[in-house]
Image (spheres, rainbow, N blue to C red):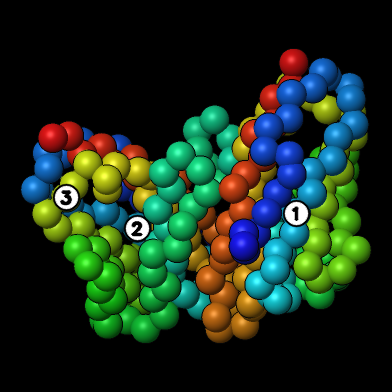
Amino acid sequence: DTAVSQTPKYLVTQMGNDKSIKCEQNLGHDTMYWYKQDSKKFLKIMFSYNNKELIINETVPNRFSPKSPDKAHLNLHINSLELGDSAVYFCASSPGGVRGTQYFGPGTRLTVL
Amino acid sequence: EDKVVQSPLSLVVHEGDTVTLNCSYEVTNFRSLLWYKQEKKAPTFLFMLTSSGIEKKSGRLSSILDKKELFSILNITATQTGDSAVYLCAALKTSYDKVIFGPGTSLSVIP
């Protein structure tokens, strides 16, 4: 069973469209994250949720909106996609507290044309 | 501003060589230092270091943290082509488990 799963794995879309990426973890973790990895491979945190509550919201355009329907799911919705949004988006989860090791999903490669 | 720096940014070695990857950090509310290996897909966890001076080992990989000098090293002995990857260092903060990643070291091991 996959611990952290994301769908879709690949997403190709036109500028201006709205798209969503879904993430689910079956590890029973309390905390989930979204990261963006750009072409230079730099992993940067975007959001973090703990038990469905937003706890980290980095300087991300408000076109990006995370939603956590329950603590096992954290979805990312992106409005009005721009060329610069092209990247790999990773979801991750961690048990939180002193055991903070993060487990990453396989990533979603988003290409905006 | 929180910062994690890694060096070198890329490295090419021959199989059998020993490599040392460096990571320094300036992070408020620091809790632990994490090392990840990223091949083609998602980063996979290698080590979490919380205490200074205690070496952690896993096979040919080992790592140690110096909290006074704010750095960590990752050693790989007898490198193999399968060690080729990007090695990411990250600082875990106490506040909300926020993780700050470094830029990574791209390691290529050639036969």
In this view, B2 is above or below B62: above
Is there any visible trace of residue B69 in the rendered image?
no
Q: Nearer the viewer, mark 3 or mark 2?
A: 3
User: Residue B83 in the image: x percent, y percent?
Assistant: 27, 48
For disc 3, the marked residue is B79
Do the residues bearing badges 1 and 2 touch, measured as CB atoms within 8 Å?
A: no
Question: Splitting the image into 4 quarters, where does residue B28 fall?
Answer: bottom right
- Mark 3: which secondary structure? loop
- Mark 1: which secondary structure? strand
Amino acid type indicated by mark 1: Cys
In this view, A99 is above or below A112: below
Chain designation of label 3: B
Do the residues bearing badges 3 and 1 touch, measured as CB atoms within 8 Å?
A: no
Residue A86 left/right relative to A42: right
| Residue A76: mark | none
In this view, B23 is above or below A26: above
Residue A75 left/right relative to A4: right
| Residue B23: mark | 2
The quadrant of the image that shows the C terminus of chain A is top right
Chain designation of label 1: A
User: Residue A92 in the image: x percent, y percent?
Assistant: 64, 59
